[in-house]
């Protein structure tokens, strides 16, 4: 039986939770996933460890920057580093990633430096990067809306002859990410429908971080989310999202299948949003600190470190060096944010349309004229 | 090249076919558009000619149609989505207004959204609920979208072509009641007028009637009826809702001093309010009367047995003209 299941157990609660590294850092075998991660070297795992440390450092710094008034808002990905780094690295360079606004680890794995993400949260732009350059969709804020878009991209890949040709360098798939809250959106269901009907090369990946702002996953679904897609005929698996190795293996298997032309897959990764929903949120109103402590014990970074230490793949010097690099990254972010100039408000009129639009041009001109009056006054005042 | 006589529906079919022949990235998506050729047969024969990869019978999900169309735009495709009826566009409203309209802006110009959304709209066909609406104002309010509406076969052909060629998302509101009204279509020579320019379709001197889509023929009919009473009404086909060509309307109003706007959409919160505000501003000293409007009432579109009283007709248009002239 494949790790991607097509049937639902008699008792929904019997849904297995697939993992390779237990919370205590011990390695647990799983034939299919072991094969999917067998090629990973100690160097690879050290890189994933470092990546997780780096994005956590950037994340904590971003929260500080918000507290200092440098960012309008920040959505922390604290605790979800394993799911994001594992998934991000499982994708091939040519694959297309479709993230939501909390996917800073995905962005990092894609080579998007954290400072580039901050312009959205500072209020400088609505999008941080060129989706074509980085093969990454813009961060989605209207949750769930990305699901059919990801499928459409995958339908384009099918039409471009980039699926199932057997060429590892060109065959391409899409990885669409959404959370447990988003899973309730109708557009996610429509995404499942379109992906299944057209057998589009699209892997849906949910980080079930237990909370949609203040609402627990139990309100979103009566059954493990992984079971949902099976009704669409989309094979799925529930994995431990704080186990970077299991995430990597499952996402790799799913993307490989999608690229081969075997259609969509769905992965539910159990993880935990260790911080507030955003810097505007107050989790003490809806959840207990005991729960946070329970999940802290399952931390993805600690877990990989314990495992790698036991394997003699890392030592204290390496851990310290990663922490120092994280600190350096945080300091760099701190300096970069202060160097970010506010855009000239005239920029708001740019790119509304691809081709000139007379109304936008007229209003832009009105704005220029209006502003010019005050510039004159300022000048006069100075002269006086 | 001589023009051919085509009904509006077939002019659109011809526009789609020619665009698909010219650019292999153009593809069609929608419910029942393949073997059936669409419930109005607008895509008739296109799946046979272009295959199932380019003419896609989608699952019944409007958000899925527009959402997947957005993804296809990211891959360089130019999807033309058919929404089966006006009232069924709303499940896709999120995709259209928060995504499609804003993606070019969000990506700071790096991603273009050359999608076309065809929506058969308007009433007068004796249909059940959700099949007779005119929601153009609800989309015009969203920056990033272009909106056109043809009133005749020639425009239907060239607006279809122009919308597909546009690098911005374009909604075409098609006057479904008049799908089978024939007109001359010149497909060989591109007309000089672009799809966003209003057109004086009947010159006159006493007052200006402005209409679009299915209401243009009503405005012309009303002008003919008024001419029997010795009134010479100018009729303008707005053609485009966004951008709105108020310059052509203002030029006319400066001559006639009076403007009556006719449309099927409910008057409250409609495009005609926007036009009235702009014309009042641009033609304040030329206006002999306030801008008057004739359209639907602030009710849901009524059951078919009442729609004749809901929709503007010659009597209501001429009543408004009389009121305008009475100032």
Image (tube, coloured by chain):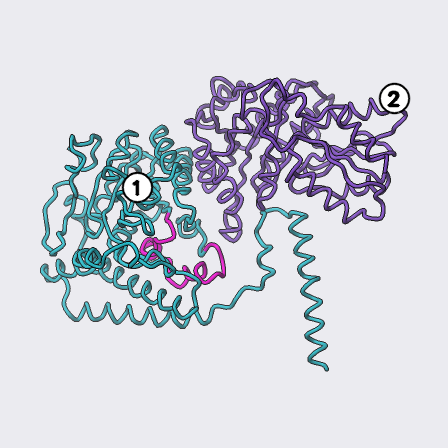
Residue B92 is situated, as x and y percent measured from the top left of the image, at 48, 35
Q: Which mark is residue B180?
A: none
The residue nearer to you, when weighing A102 against B11, is A102
| Residue under label 2 | B228
Chain in cyan (letter) = A
Is residue A138 or residue B27 the one in the foreground? A138
Q: As drawn, is B31 to the left or to the right of A219? A: right
Q: Is residue A301 left or right of residue A133?
A: left
Residue A42 seen from this side: no
Residue at 64% x, 33% y: name it.
B266
Return the residue at label 1: A220
Name the image quarter holding the C terminus of chain A.
Answer: bottom right
The chain ID associated with circle 1 is A
Q: Position of residue A337 (x, y in %)?
A: 43, 69
Q: Residue at x 78, y 31 (%)?
A: B320
Secondary structure category for the residue under label 2: helix
Residue B117, x across and y down, in percent: 55, 33
What is the span of residues highlighted in magenta in the rendered image?
A99-127
Q: Is residue B270 magenta?
A: no
CA gap, disc 2 and disc 1: 67 Å
Residue A199: give x, y in percent of width and height: 34, 31
Query: In the image, which lettered chain appears purple?
Result: B
Viewer can see residue B132: yes
Q: Nearer the viewer, residue A274 or A152?
A: A274
Q: In the rendered structure, the residue with mark 2 lies on which chain?
A: B
Query: Measured along the vertical axis of the image, is residue B29 above or below residue A110?
Result: above
Magenta span has A110?
Answer: yes
* Quarter-of-image position of residue A227: top left
Residue at the image position 33 percent from the left and 68 percent from the top: A329
């Amino acid at each position: 039986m494949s790790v991607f299941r097509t049937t639902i157990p008699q008792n929904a609660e019997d849904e297995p939770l697939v993992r390779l590294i237990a919370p205590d850092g011990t390695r647990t075998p799983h034939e299919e996933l072991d094969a999917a991660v067998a090629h990973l070297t100690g160097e690879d795992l050290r890189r994933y460890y470092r990546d997780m440390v780096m994005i956590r450092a950037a994340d904590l710094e971003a929260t500080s920057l918000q507290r200092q008034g440098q960012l309008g808002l920040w959505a922390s990905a604290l605790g979800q580093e394993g799911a994001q780094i594992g998934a991000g690295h499982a994708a091939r360079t040519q694959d297309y990633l479709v993230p939501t606004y909390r996917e800073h680890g995905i962005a990092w794995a894609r080579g998007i430096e954290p400072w580039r993400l901050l312009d959205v949260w500072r209020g400088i732009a609505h999008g941080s990067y060129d989706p074509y350059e980085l093969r990454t969709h813009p961060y989605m804020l209207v949750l769930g809306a990305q699901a059919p878009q990801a499928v459409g991209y995958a339908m384009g890949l099918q039409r471009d002859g980039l699926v199932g040709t057997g060429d590892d360098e060109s065959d391409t798939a899409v990885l669409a990410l959404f959370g447990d809250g988003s899973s309730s959106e109708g557009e996610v269901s429509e995404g499942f429908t379109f992906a299944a009907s057209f057998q589009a090369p699209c892997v849906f990946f949910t980080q079930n971080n237990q909370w949609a702002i203040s609402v627990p996953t139990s309100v979103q679904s009566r059954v493990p989310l992984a079971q949902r897609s099976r009704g669409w005929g989309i094979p799925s698996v529930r994995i431990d999202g704080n186990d970077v190795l299991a995430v990597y293996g499952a996402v790799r298997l799913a993307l490989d299948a999608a690229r081969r032309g075997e259609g969509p897959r769905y992965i539910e990764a159990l993880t935990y949003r260790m911080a507030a929903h955003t810097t505007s949120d107050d989790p003490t109103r809806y959840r207990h600190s005991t729960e946070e402590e329970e999940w802290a014990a399952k931390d993805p970074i600690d877990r990989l470190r314990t495992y790698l230490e036991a394997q003699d793949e890392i030592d204290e010097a390496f851990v310290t060096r990663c922490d120092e690099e994280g600190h350096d990254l945080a300091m760099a972010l701190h300096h970069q944010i202060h160097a970010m100039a506010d855009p000239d408000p005239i920029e708001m009129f740019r790119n509304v349309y691809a081709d000139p639009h007379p109304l936008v041009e007229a209003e832009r001109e009105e704005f220029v004229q209006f502003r010019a009056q005050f510039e004159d006054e300022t000048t006069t005042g100075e002269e006086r | 090249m001589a023009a051919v006589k085509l009904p509006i529906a077939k002019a659109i079919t011809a526009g789609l076919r020619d665009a698909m022949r010219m650019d292999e990235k153009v593809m069609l998506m929608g419910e029942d558009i393949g073997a059936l050729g669409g419930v109005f047969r607008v895509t008739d024969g296109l799946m046979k000619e272009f295959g199932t990869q380019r003419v896609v019978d989608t699952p019944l999900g409007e958000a899925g149609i527009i959402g997947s169309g957005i993804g296809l735009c990211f891959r360089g495709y130019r999807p033309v989505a058919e929404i089966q009826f006006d009232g069924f566009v709303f499940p896709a409203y999120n995709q259209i207004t928060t995504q499609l309209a804003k993606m070019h802006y969000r990506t700071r110009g790096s991603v273009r959204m050359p999608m076309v959304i065809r929506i058969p709209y308007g009433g007068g066909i004796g249909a059940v609920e959700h099949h007779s609406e005119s929601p153009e104002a609800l989309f015009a309010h969203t920056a990033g979208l272009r909106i056109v509406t043809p009133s005749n076969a020639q425009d239907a052909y060239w607006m279809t072509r122009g919308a597909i060629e546009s690098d911005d998302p374009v909604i075409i509101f098609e006057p479904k009641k008049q799908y089978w009204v024939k007109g001359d279509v010149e497909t060989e020579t591109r007309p000089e007028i672009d799809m966003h320019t209003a057109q004086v379709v009947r010159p006159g001197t006493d007052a200006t009637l402005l209409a679009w889509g299915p209401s243009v023929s009503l405005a012309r009919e009303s002008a003919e009826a008024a001419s029997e009473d010795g009134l010479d009404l100018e009729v303008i086909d707005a053609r485009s809702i966004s951008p709105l060509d108020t310059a052509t309307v203002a030029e006319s109003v400066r001559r006639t001093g009076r403007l009556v706007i006719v449309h099927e959409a409910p008057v409250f919160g409609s495009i005609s309010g926007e036009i009235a505000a702009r014309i009042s501003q641009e033609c304040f000293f030329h206006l002999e009367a306030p801008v008057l409007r004739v359209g639907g009432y602030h009710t849901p579109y009524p059951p078919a047995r009442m729609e004749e009283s809901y929709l503007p007709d010659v009597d209501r248009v001429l009543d408004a003209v009389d009121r305008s002239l009475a100032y």
